[in-house]
Amino acid sequence: MSYEREKIIAIEAVLAATQLCEQVRQQISPAAIEKKDKSPVTIADYGSQALICRALAEAFPQDPVIAEEEAAALGSAEMKLQLQQVTDSIRQVIPTVVPAEVLNWIGHGSAQSGDRYWTLDPIDGTKGFLRQDQYAVALALVEAGEIKVGVLSCPALSLNGLGPGLLFTAVRGEGATMRSLENEASQPIQVAQGTQNLRFVESVESGHGNQSQQSAIAQTVGITAPSLRMDSQAKYAAVATGEAALYLRLPSPKTPDYREKIWDHAAGVIVVEEAGGKVTDMYGQKLDFTQGAKLVHNQGVIVSNGRLHDQVIAALAT
Ligand SMILES: Nc1ncnc2c1ncn2[C@@H]1O[C@H](COP(=O)(O)OS(=O)(=O)O)[C@@H](OP(=O)(O)O)[C@H]1O
Ligand SMILES: [Mg+2]
Ligand SMILES: [Mg+2]
Ligand SMILES: [Mg+2]
């Protein structure tokens, strides 16, 4: 089956959401709102989710969407001002929009599961976004547990003389491409082929991984250079383009029972796989996208150029 229409709609929606995020970011300091789990969310996270869910609901009304943000939180009485700000940010794209519609669109992303579903992280790396650093808008289509389409926008990323502002797209069996956000011309991308000057990427936030174990494993497989620390699924883009050979995300000793969320990975996974790389959990198992919002059957995420993969899994087993 061809996924041409899905790809076109997904790219268009992610580009519109990216523009909204960049407009909010360019205001001197986008404000953080604290969620129930103490993690930050901003006007732009909600605006991005509203725009993308609206586009998906219109084009693919039957498809469930499993997205990060919840409408209930933004719809509460004490969030009236923030809901108005989200509505205002969307007004530039949809002049007639009213707050109730915004909540409906965000709520469209609250599906729990589906055989065919979309998964969306409206801003991945919200902490990076707030620091004016790396973040991503990440959208993927999953069918029967297999990721079929991934679109990943990295508005603050520059690579190979392109950017800042890159868009990565992958369709199962068709390869992965990269383009500038401004220019439609795209080029195929490929993971690192050689064995020289290899680097690895990891999260900026030490609480999202195990940095000491990550550097020990990298050294065991011959990577001696210090890690490249990056927020968001921009780390997957770094591996997919050969900028890094490995992305290590091992469970943090502070949150050993944490299970990864599907929207933090799906788009990045297909971009890396279609660029010739490999993604598994820390035990070498495939990530299982059939269990709803969380990767309940997996722990840790290992993303590599393929070549290094077995060595990393072997090092983790000892
Ligand atoms: N304990 C723990 N372990 C692993 N992952 C966690 C944990 N807590 C949160 N998160 C998720 O991390 C997402 C951001 O990951 P990053 O790798 O971009 O983190 S970092 O900003 O570079 O530190 C972040 O995504 P966003 O909320 O979309 O920013 C969270 O979903
Ligand atoms: Mg978040
Ligand atoms: Mg995320
Ligand atoms: Mg997010």
Image (cartoon, helix red, strand yellow):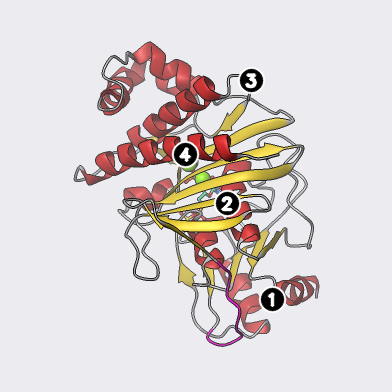
Q: Which residue is mark 4?
A: 38
Question: Percent x, y for residue 195?
Answer: 61, 85
Q: Amino acid at mark 4?
A: Lys
User: Residue at point 41% right, 22% down?
Assistant: 74
Question: Percent x, y for residue 141?
Answer: 62, 38
**In the image, the residue with mark 4 has its CB under 8 Å from the nearest atom of ligand 1:** no
Q: Which residue is mark 1?
A: 308
Q: CA distance from mark 3 to mark 1?
A: 40 Å
The numbered mark at residue 170 is 2
Question: Percent x, y for residue 180?
Answer: 37, 56
Q: CA distance from mark 3 to mark 4?
A: 33 Å
* Residue 126 visible in rendering: yes
Foreground mark, 4 or 2, reads 2
User: Residue at point 50% right, 74% down?
Assistant: 227
* Mark closest to the chain's N terminus, 4 or 2: 4
Q: Which residue is mark 3?
A: 62
* Mark closest to the chain's N terminus, 1 or 4: 4
Instruction: Please say whether residue 104 is one of the residues in the magenta stretch.
Output: no
Dominant secondary-structure state across the stretch colored magenta: loop
| In this picture, residue 313 sits left or right of residue 162 | right
The numbered mark at residue 198 is none
| In this picture, residue 303 sits left or right of residue 313 | left
* Residue 108 visible in rendering: no
Secondary structure beneath label 1: loop
Q: CA distance from mark 1 to mark 2?
A: 22 Å
Q: CA distance from mark 4 to mark 2?
A: 33 Å
Residue contact between numbered discs 3 and 1, judged by CB atoms under 8 Å: no
